Amino acid sequence: MNLPKTVRIREVGPRDGFQMEREFIPTATKIEIINALVRTGLCLFEATSFVSPRAIPQMRDAAQVLAGIDRHEGMEVGALVPNIRGAENAAAAGVDEIVLLVSASESHNRSNINQSIEGSLRGFETMAEIASEAGITVRGSISVVFGCPFEGNVPVENVDRIVERMAALGITAVTLGDTTGMATPPIVRRVCRSVMDKYPGLEIGLHFHNTRGLGLVNVYEALGMGFDIFESSIGGLGGCPFAPGATGNVCTEDLVYMMEELGLETGIDLVELIRVAKKVEETVGRELPGQVMKSGRRLDLYPPLLNPLI
């Protein structure tokens, strides 16, 4: 396989992960965790979302979280914005990037954003203008690209039409999201190849969930196709709050571990990342699905146990 030499990882746990937590995580704790993630070498973040606090109360402190993050040159701190008001608030808060979200299926878009796909796309025009005036980059994010929990298989044509509308607005970076973990390697190959062939200059990131245990399998498939931007969540936190059974994202430390074992560079300190994952586990108060945080790296050695019966 012709794998890329380096891989960029965007941490989405502070947004996609924390939004699923019922108990409000204190703002100071969110900032502490993000700053600890920054110290691991992570540079790309989807740090929060500017959504209605009635819909997702966990994100009601978005502006305060952004104000507390330790920013440095080379970092890109983004926020998801589902509507024009969210774009205005994100711009005022000083994000580096706003993420425009739409679903590839009509039913999921109405469930997730409470409007039609066409309504979302029309709003993107104004939102892109807001970002341009503020000097903020725009990234498109398309949910349920690889399957919808309400409609089943999603036609590739749905995705192509959305990407075409985004490209017409000057958007040059898009994330294809496996929002409920319905992707399989053949689906990944078919959908991604279609988008790649039609939009060869587009920067495509991939966002997989591990709902059915195929998260890293799908990442490996995409690596073989030349993809080098992946989104993941610390500890495997997250899911879609408006879709049944949509459990966690691909786990960041598991993803980094796999990249290291493949000889690919990420610029991320895995040992420090594991420490942060354990801190996040303490914060949410339950066991998280990440595997490497439990077992350690393959060559982490331990003293042999003595058999007391001998």
Image: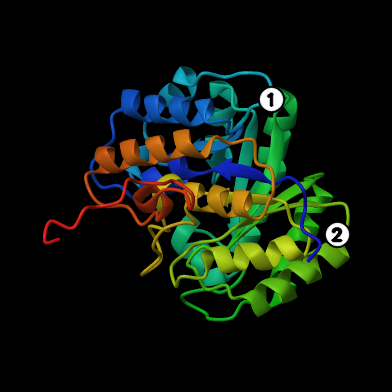
Taking the spot 69% from the left edge, 25% from the top edge, the residue there is: 74
SS state under label 1: loop
Please name the amino acid that badge 2 sits on. Answer: Tyr
- Residue 272 percent location from the top left of the image: 46, 33
Q: Is residue 237 visible?
A: no
Mark 1 or 2, nearer chain start: 1
Distance of label 1 from label 2 (alpha carbons): 26 Å
Mark 1 or 2, which is nearer the eye? 1
Taking the spot 67% from the left edge, 79% from the top edge, the residue there is: 186
Q: Which residue is mark 2?
A: 199
- Residue 145 percent location from the top left of the image: 62, 67
Q: Residues within 10 Å of mark 2 (few under 14, many from 20)?
A: some
- Residue 32 percent location from the top left of the image: 38, 25
In this rendering, the answer to whether 180 lies above or below 98 is below
In this rendering, the answer to whether 151 lies above or below 30 is below
Residue 144 versus residue 204: which sits nearer the camera?
204
